[in-house]
Image: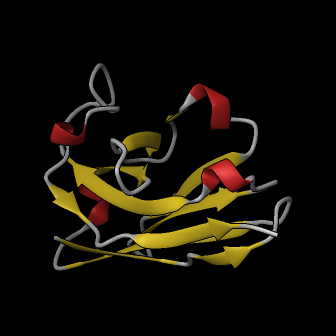
Amino acid sequence: VQLQASGGGLVQPGESLRLSCAASGGALSSYIVAWFRQVPGKEREPVSVISTSGGTTYYKDSLKDRFTISRDNAKNTVSLQMNSLKPEDTANYYCAAGRRPLLPGWTLSRYYNYWGQGTEVTVSS
C-alpha cells in the first residue's frame, strides 16, 4: 500500500490544520494508522494512532487535548485534526500503516510497514 500525506502548511499560533493520509494500492482498513512528526535533527516522535475500525485511538499525552485522529475506511483515508497549534508543533508530519495490534508498540517507528512522504507543518507568527 502507498500512503500520501497532505494538508500541511504555514499557519499562525492558535490556528488549525487538518492533515490527510490517503492510501492507494490496498485497503487501508486492514491497517492501524499512525501519525508521527519529526523536526530536522531530532528523533521522529509519535503523535497518534487509530485502530483499523477507528474505535480506538491513542495520543502523545501532551497532544490529546488539541489533536484528533479519525479515519474513513470507505475513502481509504485517515485524518489528523490539529487545533490551537503552537510553534512547537512545527515539524514534518508522516503517516504510517501497520498490521500489528495498537499495543504495546504503536509509538515505535519499526511497528509500521508503510510510510507516507511527509507533509510540512509550520506554526509561526
For the question of whether residue 20 can be seen, the reply is no
Specify whether 123 is left or right of 75: right
Q: Position of residue 22 (x, y in %)?
A: 38, 76
Identify which residue is drawn at 29% across, 73% down: 117
Q: Where is residue 109 in the image (x, y as percent from the top left)?
A: 23, 41
Specify whether 68 is left or right of 40: right
Could you say which is closer to the camera, residue 45 or residue 33?
45
Identify which residue is drawn at 38% across, 72% down: 76
Q: How was this image coloured?
A: secondary structure
Specify whether 18 is left or right of 99: right
Identity of the residue furthest to the right in this view: 14
Identity of the residue furthest to the top in this view: 104
Identify which residue is drawn at 49% across, 47% down: 54
Identify which residue is drawn at 38% across, 57% down: 40
Quadrant of the image containing the N terminus = bottom left
- 33 shown above or below 47: below
Q: Where is residue 36 in the image (x, y as percent from the top left)?
A: 40, 49
Q: Position of residue 34 (x, y in %)?
A: 38, 48
- Image quarter of residue 18: bottom right
For the question of whether residue 107 can be seen, the reply is yes
Identity of the residue furthest to the front in this view: 41
Specify whether 5 is left or right of 101: right
Q: How many labels does the image show?
A: 0
Quadrant of the image containing the C terminus = bottom right
